[in-house]
Image (spheres, helix red, strand yellow):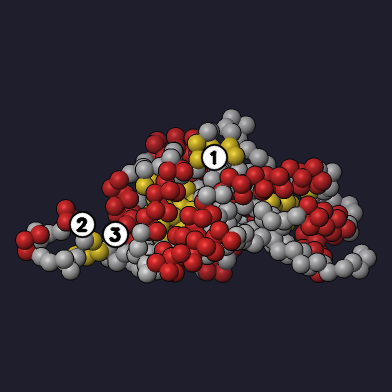
Amino acid sequence: MKNLPMHDIPYSTQQITDADISAVSDVLRSGWLTQGPTVPRFESAFATHHGVAHAVAVTNATAALHIACLALGAAPGKWVWTSPNSFVASANCALYCGADVDFVDIDPVTRNLSVEALARKLVHAEHTGTLPTVVIPVHFAGLPCDLFAIRALADRYGFKVLEDASHATGASYEGALIGSRYVDASVFSFHPVKIITTGEGGMVTTQDEQLAHRLRLLRSHGVTREAALLELSDAQTGAWYYEQKVLGFNYRMTDLQAALGLSQLGRMDELHRARENLVRRYDELLTDLPLRLPTHQPSPLTRARSAWHLYAVEVEPGPGVADRATVFARMRAQGIMVNVHYQPIHLQPFYRARGFEPGQFPAAEAYYRRAMSIPMYPDLSGAEQAIVVRELILAIQA
């Protein structure tokens, strides 16, 4: 292919405005860098925006997955199932709790956990006495899973649903924002490349008051000062008094993070519209190439609005078409930082050492062999998007 000028286009990056900087500066001047009033304000605003009763902010989404798994009953002798097409945190969280992990293959169209594969696996698990305690569907690239169908299976087989919405802040399913219906708890990520950012940070949402209380204990050493929960009465204690109720962790979000999150939450709809505009243009410009483009809906029977964290294509093999590795290398050589999401979790050396093997989840493995995420972030300009498409057209030629 021709030698063209080098570009500098990341696969994703955060958008930081003067308003974001001002919000963080205000906290720096306030005297409350952590455990102050901004975290509760962020939690309240996030819960209100998503129409959910409780939002619990933590240091990152991995911490959110960990304490949510614990709170939902993951423990030694229990099973947690998730998708192999995700980052390793979606499975590791169960191991942190001492539980066993298994995977459910993906739907090749949505790249999400397959409801059909889940139903088949549940039938077998019921016969063998290995039903999961928790199932973690992952909203890959921001597209919601088919939650109504998963909820029906959960009610039938008695497992909890913890949705990994790390890609899906602000996404909706059947008219309601993710995190408010169909599941027992939801986890969101505020990593810099996600829909909104707090630098690092995560959130767990739930409608269950008791679950929210347990999450708050777990994120802060298992310690409480709430008078109603203390074993000793006010008359027996002083203002310094607190009690540890469970073995918890230091997973508290700082007020600095929360201030950035609050500022970003205020323009989340604007950020979504920018992503959707990029998607429409990609859909138009790439439609005749030997690529499988991402779908917009979780099933023919349900409707959703993706958060479009990623725009992941699949390089379709055929005459005159370069393989994915070649396309990837050519794009990177031109300064376009494409990426691959994800290497199947079960093929990682750590999980292969636990007994998983190639061929167990063929749809996830087939997707991985062809997958490539192309640049997607709100500040990607029309000119830069045109460069990405032009270079992709050249790179895909064998």
Tell me the mark number nearer the camera, choosing from 2 and 1.
Answer: 2
Which badge, 2 or 3, comes first in the chain's sequence?
A: 3
Q: Is residue 227 left or right of residue 2?
A: left
> What distance separates the C-alpha of mark 1 from that of mark 3?
29 Å
Tell me, yes or no, whether the two marked residues, 2 and 3, touch with CB atoms within 8 Å. no
Q: Assess disc 1: are there few (<14), some (14-19) or many (≥20) residues with their C-alpha within 10 Å of its C-alpha.
A: many
Q: Quadrant of the N terminus?
A: bottom right
> Amino acid type of disc 1?
Ser
> What distance separates the C-alpha of mark 2 from that of mark 1?
35 Å
Tell me, yes or no, whether the two marked residues, 1 and 3, touch with CB atoms within 8 Å. no
Measured as percent of width and height from the top left, residue 233 is found at: 9, 58
| Pointer 2 residue | 226
| Pointer 3 residue | 217
State the residue in front, 312 or 91: 312
The disc placed on residue 172 is 1
Q: Residue furthest right?
A: 2
Occupied quadrant, residue 214: bottom left
Q: Is residue 262 left or right of residue 273?
A: left
Circle 2: element type: loop
Tell me the mark number nearer the camera, choosing from 2 and 3.
Answer: 2
Q: Is residue 337 visible?
A: yes
> Amino acid type of disc 2?
Glu
> What distance separates the C-alpha of mark 2 from that of mark 3?
11 Å
Give the residue at x 40% y 59%: 38
State the residue in front, 206 or 24: 24
